Structures are given as C-alpha cells and as structure tokens.
Image (tube, rainbow, N blue to C red):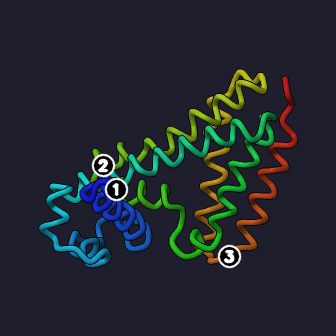
C-alpha cells in the first residue's frame, strides 16, 4: 500500500472514532491531526475540509456495513437468523452505546440540527440497513417488508437511545430480547 493511502486510512480511522466519541461539530481538524501525529497541513493535503473528511468516514462505514451484510447473508441462510444477527450487532456495541450512544443515530441527530445536507449523506448508513432488512422480510414473504424494516430499525434505535439516556445495559439487553421475541413471532409466509 502506498504511503499516501496509509495516511488517508489513518486519518479516516481517527476521524471515525473522534466524530463518534466527541461529536462531529465538537471535533476539530486539529484534534484529528493531533490524534495521529500529523500536521493540519498534511491532513488538508488529503482532505480539503472537515465535511469532505466526513464523507470519507461515511463511505468507510458504508463499506463496512455492506461487507457485514454480505457476510450475514452467507453465514445465516435462514431469514430470521439474519434478523437476529442484526439485533446481536446492537448488543455487541453495548459498552460503546452506554457511553456514546449509537454511532449512526448520534451522527444523524447532530447533523440534523443544522446541517441537513450532511445528515442526508449520513442517513445513507440507515438506508443500507433498511434496504437489507426489507430484502430479508421479502424473503420471508411479507408484503409490508418496507414497514417492517423501518419498525425493526426503530425498535433497535429506541433501545439504544434509552439505554444510553439511562446508562442501563440491562435495559438494552431486555429490549433486544423483546425484539428477538418479536422476530420469532413473525410468520414465514
């Protein structure tokens, strides 16, 4: 891998973590440069603006999401098992959610307050999951697959938000268990 690519990857990785833990608006270009030990000028060589860097972070996350969903499709041939894998993904992030909230949800809320064009780009992460969930529900024979997809996303986001608000991991586990029961109750048509 060429040196410029390594630097770019390191910048995106650091920005991903800082945007999540500190917030996009609270993270400066200096913070990111400092985190990986480069100058602001070097960072600006790779990314002209923080907004451009955010796009790279979103694209990085989208690539990760797409790869994960493709892996789940291969690993879990049964649709309900794939839906439960989605729920497990939320549970696997319990400690981070307790401390910082959902990475996608937090970013969308922050950007939605006064940066709609950036939020629309960030929403693509939710769209990726929603489209995949819709496909899974269709495979189960549900005509209302789009509605079910958004319902499952809403339940997972609600569980993540409330467990963050109350710093309560038991709440997250309990709510995710209820979501799994709901999945089990769905008829395979």
Q: Looking at the rendering, in which quadrant would you find the C terminus?
A: top right
Q: Residue at (31%, 77%) from the top-left corner?
A: 35
Residue at the limit of the structure toward the left, as seen here: 41
Residue 120: where, in percent of width, then height?
Answer: 36, 43
Q: Residue at x 57, y 33 (%)?
A: 131
Q: Is residue 139 above or below residue 43?
A: above
Q: In the image, is residue 109 above or below residue 70?
A: below
Q: Of label 3 and label 2, which has the lower sequence position?
A: 2
Q: Which residue is mark 2?
A: 118
Q: Left or right: 111 with respect to 166?
A: left
Foreground residue among 142 and 32: 32
The location of residue 154, given as percent across then percent down, is 61, 48
Disc 3 packing (10 Å; few <14; some 14–19; many ≥20): some
Query: Horizontally, is 129 left or right of 76 in the view?
Result: left
Q: Earlier in the sequence, mark 3 or mark 1?
A: 1
User: In what element is the residue under mark 2?
Assistant: helix
Q: Which mark is residue 111?
A: 1
Regarding residue 114, the answer to whether it shows in the image is no
Residue situated in front as seen by the camera: 109 or 104: 104
State if disc 2 and disc 1 touch (CB < 8 Å): yes
How far apart are the alpha carbons under marks 3 and 1?
25 Å
Q: Which residue is mark 3?
A: 168
Residue 51: assigned label: none
Q: Position of residue 122 (x, y in %)?
A: 39, 48
């Amino acid at each position: 891998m060429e040196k410029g690519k390594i630097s770019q990857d390191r910048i995106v990785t650091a920005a991903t973590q800082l945007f999540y833990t500190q917030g996009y608006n609270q993270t400066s270009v200096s913070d990111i440069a400092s985190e990986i030990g480069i100058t602001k000028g070097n960072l600006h060589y790779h990314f002209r603006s923080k907004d451009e860097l955010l796009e790279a972070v979103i694209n990085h996350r989208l690539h990760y999401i797409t790869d994960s969903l493709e892996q789940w499709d291969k690993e879990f041939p049964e649709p309900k098992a794939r839906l439960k894998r989605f729920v497990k993904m939320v549970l696997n992030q319990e400690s981070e959610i307790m401390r910082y909230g959902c990475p996608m949800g937090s970013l969308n809320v922050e950007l939605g307050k006064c940066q709609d064009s950036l939020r629309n780009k960030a929403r693509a992460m939710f769209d990726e999951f929603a489209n995949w969930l819709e496909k899974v529900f269709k495979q189960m024979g549900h005509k209302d697959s789009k509605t079910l997809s958004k319902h499952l996303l809403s339940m997972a986001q609600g569980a993540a938000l409330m467990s963050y608000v109350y710093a309560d991991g038991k709440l997250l586990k309990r709510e995710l268990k209820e979501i799994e029961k709901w999945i089990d109750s769905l008829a395979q048509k």
